[in-house]
Amino acid sequence: MNEDVRSKGYGTQTLKALEEDAKGRGVTSISLHVFNHNEGAFPLYQRVGYRITNILMAKALD
């Protein structure tokens, strides 16, 4: 990801626009799949109201 565009509110604005569009189309919920290594995404999603609903864990067998 380009560091120069982080923390400028683009993600928040995009999510809010998505939610408004979805509501207008009759959508009643949005679910996201977030990779664990995407640490910056968790605070953003939680800040705009998303909550963790499940956790999928995996282990590589070498």
Image (cartoon, rainbow, N blue to C red):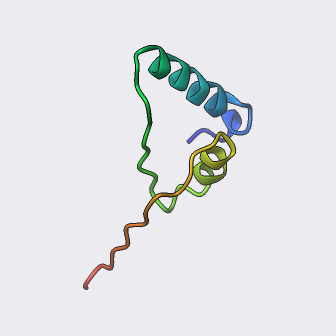
Looking at the image, the residue that sits furthest to the right is 8
Q: Residue at x 33, y 74 (%)?
A: 58
Residue 47 placement: quadrant: top right
Q: Residue at x 53, y 26 (%)?
A: 19
Nearest the eye: 47 or 11: 47
Nearest the eye: 38 or 13: 13
Q: Left or right: 1 with respect to 56? A: right
Looking at the image, the residue that sits furthest to the bottom is 62
- Residue 52: % across, % down: 52, 57
Report the quarter where the C terminus lies.
bottom left
Q: Left or right: 22 with respect to 43? A: left
* Above or below 21: residue 49: below
- Residue 57: % across, % down: 37, 73
Looking at the image, the residue that sits furthest to the left is 61
Q: Left or right: 23 with respect to 17? A: left
* Above or below 45: residue 29: above
- Residue 45: % across, % down: 60, 45
Nearest the eye: 41 or 29: 29
Nearest the eye: 2 or 37: 37
Residue 7 placement: quadrant: top right
- Residue 37: % across, % down: 51, 61
Q: Residue at x 53, y 55 (%)?
A: 38
Q: How many marks?
A: 0
Q: Left or right: 24 with respect to 49? A: left
Report the quarter where the N terminus lies.
top right
Looking at the image, the residue that sits furthest to the top is 24
